[in-house]
Image (cartoon, grey):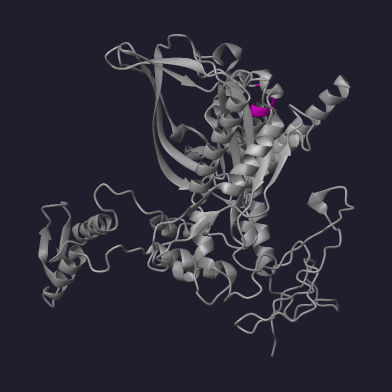
Amino acid sequence: MTLSTLPAAPGPISTGSGTAACAEPATVPDWWRRSADLNKQAIARAARPDYEAWLVHVRSAAACTRPVRLAGSIATVDKATGGVLSERHTADLPDGVIYKPCGNRRESVCPGCSDRYKRDAYHVVRSGLVGGKGVTEQVARHPAVFPTFTAPSFGQVHTRIVKRHTCTRRTDCDCRPEPCHARRDLTTCPHRVQLLCFARHAETDRNLGTPLCPDCYDYDAQAVWNVTAGELWRRTSIAINRHIRQVAKARGVADVPVTTYDKNGKARTRWVCPIRLSFGKAAEMQRRGVVHFHAIVRIDGYHPEDPDAIVAPPPELDAADLVAAVDHAAATVRFTTDPHPANPGGWPIGWGDQVLTKVITVAADGQVTDAQVAAYLAKYATKSTEITGHASNRLTDDTVTLYADPDGTHTERLIDACWRLGNFRTDPEPPASLAAKRRLQSAPADPFGPLRTDPDCGGCTRYRTCPTCAAEQVAADEAARRTPAGAPASPYFRLRRWAHMLGFGGHFLTKSRRYSITFAMLRDQRITFRRAQTCGPEQAEPAAEPTTLVVNFLQFVGAGWQTTADAILANTSAAMAREHAESARHALASLAA
C-alpha cells in the first residue's frame, strides 16, 4: 500500500531520506505542476514579438490587481461637420482590449490603486495646510488644529495600552503594554462572566477589541451610533462655527455687508461674520467595530466681493480659540434618535470622553506638523473594516446569514444588529401588505399558465402573476409604507444597506469645498503629464477651441488579467518602474543637498 504525500517545503523530489520524503516519487505535486505551467505562460508571453508593445499598452494598469478590460472602438469626430476623421478598434491592440485600473481605494482589495489614492489624498490634505497646486500659500499662516473625536463606550473590551513608549517608530512598536483589565476584586457581570483580564495583548492579538462579555455589550447602540455618525459630525461642525462667531463678536470683530440679488433684480443686503471654517475629515474604524474621526479645522477670512477666495482671518482669533471651540462642541453636541420598536425612547448620540485636539505647527507652535497630519489622514483613507477581521461586499438576504449571527463573534453580532434594526416598521400591518397577503391567499394552486407576454413590462412568462411586475409592486409598497408622504426617510433604513460596513455609511475622507484641491484636479494634472510624455509638450494642453471630439464606443468585457503570468509580468514591470522613479528622486535629492 502506498500513500501520496506532498513535501513540506519546496525541494527536489527524491526517494531518499529527508524531512519530507514522498512515498511515490514518480508523482509530481500539484504546486509543482502549476508553477511549471505558470513559468511556461510567462516565457510564452515574453517570447512573443509584441511583448514590448504589450508592456507599453498595459503600463497604466500594470500595478492594478483586477484591471477593467474594455473592448470597442475609438472615433475622432469633426465637431463642425460631424464626420468621422479616424476610427481605431481595440481588436488592433495587444490582447484586443484596453486595460483600465480598477481605481479601488481599499488597500486590501488593490494595493496598487490604493497607493495612488493615498498619495492623492496626501496632496489634497497637505495643500490645504501649506498651499500649492493652485491653493494660495497664505493658508500656511492660518490657524489650524487637528482634533480626534472618538465614540463612547458600549461595553468593556480587550485593550492594549502602552503608558510609556521607548520605541522610535510607532508602526513597529514593541513596547511592553499594561495588563488589559487588571482588578483586585473579582467583578462579575449579570451573565456570571468575570470582567477582568491580566493578559498583555500583542498588537496582532485577535482578542483586541472584543468585549469581555458579549452578552453585556450594547450592539444595538453601536450600530445606531455608526449609522448616525455623519449627522453627529454635521451638528458638531455647526456648533464649532457658532462658537467661533460668538468669540469673534465678543472681541469686536465687525460684520461685513453682503449684497445679493433675487430673480427680479432687487438687491438685498445682509451682514455676516468675516470668518469661515474649512474642514477635512478622515474616518478610522477601530478594532471594536466603531468609527472615530480625525479632522482638520482651519480658520479663514471671508471676502464679501469674492466669496470663493481664501483670505486671512481676523487677527483677533488664534489656534487656542479653535481648540476651545472644538472642545466645547464635543462636550455639548448631543441628540436622540427617532423612536424604534427595539427602543421606543431612541438612542442618545454623542461623542466619547476621549477627545484630543492638537495645534498644527504650520500656523503656530503646535504638537504635530502638516506632513504628519496629511500622512495620517491619507493612511486611513485607504482603510475599511479589515482591522475588525471582517471584509465583505454589500449583503443581501441570501448572503447575510454567512456573516451575521446573534450568538457568534463580535462582528457577526454587530452585523446581526444592523440587519435586525434595519427592518424598521412604523406600521406593523399597513393596508398595502394586507392586500398583498389576500392576493396571495386567493391565488390559484397552480401558479403556471400558458406562455404569454406581460403588457406592463413586455416580458414573456408562464406565471399567472409576472414576477418582475410583482417585485416592483412589492418594492413600491415597501417604500410607501416605510416613508410617509412628506416625511424624511428614517436613518434606520440605511443599516441594512451598510451592514457590511458595520453600519457606517459615510465616506472615509471628506472635506469642505473650499478647503483645498480635489481628486479630479489631480487626475486631470496626471493626464496632462502623461500626454506630455507620450505625445510631446505641444499635445499636453488642449487647444483653446478644439475642433475635434474623441468618442469612445467601449463596453465592459471582464475584470482582471487574462492569465496569472500576465499579472506577474505586468506587476513586475510596474515595480521596476517604481524603483527607477524612487532612485531618480533620491539622486535629485542628493544633488540638491
> Would you place residue 264 above or below residue 66 in this image?
above
Observer-nearest of 404 and 534 = 404
Residue 279, image x and y in percent?
58, 34
Please tell me which residue lies in front, 286 or 425.
425
Query: Is 263 within the magenta?
Result: no
Q: Residue 129 colored magenta?
A: yes
Q: Main secondary structure of the magenta part?
A: helix
Quick check: 386 left or right of 269?
right
Residue at (58, 51) in percent of width and height: 109
Residue 16: x percent and y percent?
Answer: 84, 77
Q: Quadrant of the N terminus?
A: bottom right
The residue depicted at 78 percent of the width and 34 percent of the height is: 366
In the image, is 494 to the left or to the right of 459?
A: right
Q: Which range is magenta?
A: 128-132
At a point 48% along the width and 67% down the height, the residue shown is 417
Count of numbered badges drawn on the protein: 0
Let me know if residue 235 appears in the view: yes
Residue 464 percent location from the top left of the image: 12, 66
Which of 555 and 217 lies nearest the eye of the viewer?
217
- Relative to 245, is 585 on the left or the right? right
